[in-house]
Image: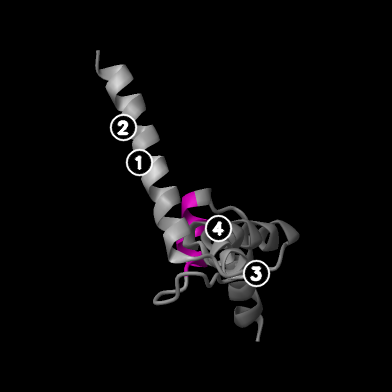
Amino acid sequence: MLNNLQKLHKVKFNLSYMNKKQKQHQSIVPGNAVAVNVIGTQREDLGFALKIWKRKVKASGVLEKIKDNKEFVKPSVTKRKQRQAAQFIQKIRNLNSF
C-alpha cells in the first residue's frame, strides 16, 4: 500500500516538473489530430492542454470551413476571387523582381 502511494506521488512530482517539449509530447493522442490528453492534476496542466487544443483546431481549419459554409457562394465568385488574388500576387512579384 505504501509503495503504491510513493509511486503515485513520484509520478505526480515528475509530471509537475516537465519541460514544454515533454508535456507537448505526452499530450498528443496518436491517430487523432485534434485530441489532447490532459497531463497531471494541476491547473497549469489543464491550461497547457487547452492551449495545444486551440492551436490544433486553428491549424486544422475546421472553424473556417464551418463559417464559410454558412451561406452559399457561387463557384464563379470563388474562381473570380482566386483569379484576382493570383493577379495581385503576380503584380507584387513583378515589382520586386526588378
Left/right placement of residue 30 relative to residue 41 reads: left
Dots 2, 1 in contact, CB < 8 A = yes
Q: Earlier in the sequence, mark 1 or mark 3?
A: 3
Q: Position of residue 55 (x, y in %)?
A: 56, 56
Using the numbered discs, state the Cα–Cα distance from disc 1 to disc 3 in whole angstroms.
59 Å
Tell me the residue that label 3 is attached to. 9
Tell me the residue that label 1 is attached to. 86
Dots 3, 2 in contact, CB < 8 A = no
Q: Is residue 38 magenta?
A: no
Q: Earlier in the sequence, mark 4 or mark 2?
A: 4
Q: Position of residue 31 (x, y in %)?
A: 39, 77
**Tag in front: 4 or 2:** 2
Identify the disc placed on residue 58. 4
Magenta part of the chain: 21-28
Amino acid at dot 4: Lys
Q: Residues within 10 Å of mark 4 (few under 14, many from 20)?
A: few
Q: Is residue 26 magenta?
A: yes
Q: Residues within 10 Å of mark 3 (few under 14, many from 20)?
A: few
Q: Position of residue 34 (x, y in %)?
A: 51, 70
Identify the disc placed on residue 90. 2
Amino acid at dot 2: Gln
Disc 1 secondary structure class:
helix
2, above or below 69, in the image? below
Q: Quadrant of residue 44?
A: bottom right
The residue most toward the right is: 43
